Image (cartoon, grey):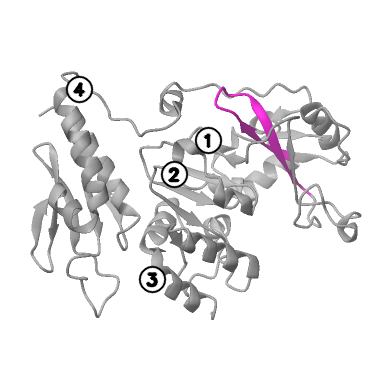
């Protein structure tokens, strides 16, 4: 058996992950979920006794509640016949290919881009890398206050004059103020900066975009998003750093995405309908802010459910609004990802959970 068949099996276990209750990887070659065959414990909804494990180059499924034991192929045949057909084809092709290789998710050629370690280039005389600033600089203090990991701070920049930087990037007379801002750059597949988001350091800033209302015109907008001239693509932060062969987490804000592994951020609600093409075949979960009283977030979750997406609905014991707040509250990255994995739902169950969540 050639090595690529192990990758094929693991990839299809990941494809299944979004349809399995409380799915999570416990080890590199061991995954756990609530058993969809017997339903697992009816008294304790947190019990997970179904396991996918690797043995002699293939993956198998076993439940320690109903004692069912079967190959991954048989599990796919029962749980997802459409995936079973794809799985058969990939395994057949791998046996005909004498050269061991890692199977590729069908995409627009971006898997090759992912492997290449692209260098993301910021060409602007108005930006300074955040880590080049003095440790007492307000922007560095902000990053420290928000507990942004130091290795992720290397993705952030600073400008004394966001208005000037905006005109440089967009090549237009954008009416942005001259205030200092932390700059979060967005890159294309070649590593060129094509857009940016400016985060205000002003504590009185308000939520909004560059098209703020007249009521907010005298205040600093917390975030301003700008695009280079002619850019039509929807903005996704971190999309070219995400590994399409692993489950992705999809959050609302770029800063929140810095705290989770393999995480991307959509900018604006329209991102729901425009996930990057090279990530559409990748198992993923949408993690919107934990605001059950926010009508817009509730509607977005409803839309995601109707589209068959996996969503995270935080438990009622969770009192923090977003990922960054959870970090500030003492949670670790590993704990947060475990909470998300254990509270990921889809379909009818997601609708029931969402209805309960909105009543909190």
Q: Say which element carries label 3.
A: helix
Report which residue position mark 2 lands on.
Answer: 261
The residue lying at 53 percent from left, 66 percent from top is 302
Report which residue position mark 3 lands on.
Answer: 349
Name the foreground residue: 325 vs 217. Answer: 217
The Cα atoms of the two marked residues, 1 and 3, are separated by 38 Å
Asked if residue 145 is positioned above or below residue 99 in the image, the reply reads: below
Image position, residue 299 (x, y; %)? 59, 66
Q: Say which element carries label 4.
A: loop
- Does residue 143 appear left or right of residue 342 in this picture? right
The Cα atoms of the two marked residues, 4 and 3, are separated by 40 Å
Mark positioned earlier in the residue sequence (1 or 3): 1
Q: Say which element carries label 1.
A: helix
Q: Looking at the rendering, in which quadrant would you find the N terminus?
A: top left
Q: Looking at the rendering, in which quadrant would you find the C terminus?
A: bottom right
Q: Is residue 260 magenta?
A: no
Report which residue position mark 4 lands on.
Answer: 100
Asked if residue 314 is positioned above or below residue 138 in the image, the reply reads: below
Which of the two discs, 2 and 4, sits closer to the camera?
A: 4
Q: Which residues are magenta?
A: 182-201
Mark positioned earlier in the residue sequence (1 or 4): 4
Which of the two discs, 1 and 3, sits closer to the camera?
A: 3
The Cα atoms of the two marked residues, 2 and 1, are separated by 13 Å
The residue lying at 25 percent from left, 64 percent from top is 34
Q: Quadrant of residue 345?
A: bottom left
Mark number for residue 122?
none
Mark positioned earlier in the residue sequence (2 or 1): 1
The Cα atoms of the two marked residues, 1 and 4, are separated by 34 Å
Mark number for residue 151?
1
Q: In the rendered image, is residue 27 in sight? A: no
């Amino acid at each position: 058996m050639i090595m690529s068949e192990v990758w094929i099996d693991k990839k299809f276990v990941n494809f299944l992950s979004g349809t399995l209750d409380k799915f999570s990887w416990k080890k590199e070659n061991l995954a756990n979920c609530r058993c969809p065959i017997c339903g697992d414990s009816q008294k304790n909804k947190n019990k997970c006794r179904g396991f996918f494990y690797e043995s002699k180059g293939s993956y198998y499924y076993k439940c320690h509640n109903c004692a069912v034991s079967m190959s991954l192929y048989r599990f796919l045949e029962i749980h997802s016949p459409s995936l079973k057909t794809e799985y058969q084809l990939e395994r057949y092709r791998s046996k005909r290919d004498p050269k061991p290789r890692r199977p590729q998710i069908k995409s627009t050629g971006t898997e090759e881009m992912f492997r290449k370690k692209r260098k993301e280039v910021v060409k602007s005389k108005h930006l300074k890398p955040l880590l080049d600033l003095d440790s007492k600089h307000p922007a560095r203090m902000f990053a420290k206050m928000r507990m942004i990991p130091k290795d992720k701070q290397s993705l952030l920049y600073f400008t004394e004059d966001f208005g000037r930087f905006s005109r440089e990037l967009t090549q237009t007379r954008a009416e942005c103020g001259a205030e200092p801002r932390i700059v979060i750059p967005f890159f294309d597949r070649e590593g060129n900066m094509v857009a940016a988001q400016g985060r205000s350091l002003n504590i009185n800033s308000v939520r909004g975009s560059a098209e703020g209302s007249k009521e907010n015109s005298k205040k600093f907008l917390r975030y301003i998003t700008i695009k280079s001239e002619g850019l039509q693509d929807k903005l996704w932060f971190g999309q070219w750093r995400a590994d399409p062969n692993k489950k992705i987490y999809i959050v609302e804000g770029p800063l929140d995405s810095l705290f989770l592994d393999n995480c991307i951020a959509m900018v604006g609600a329209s991102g729901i309908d425009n996930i990057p093409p090279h990530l559409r075949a990748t198992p993923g979960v949408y993690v919107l802010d934990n605001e059950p009283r926010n009508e817009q977030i509730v509607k977005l979750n409803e839309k995601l459910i109707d589209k068959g997406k996996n969503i995270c609905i935080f438990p009622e014991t969770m009192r923090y609004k977003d990922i960054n707040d959870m970090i500030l509250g003492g949670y670790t990255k590993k704990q947060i990802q475990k909470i998300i994995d254990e509270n990921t739902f889809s379909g009818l169950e997601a609708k029931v959970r969402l209805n309960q969540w909105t009543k909190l």
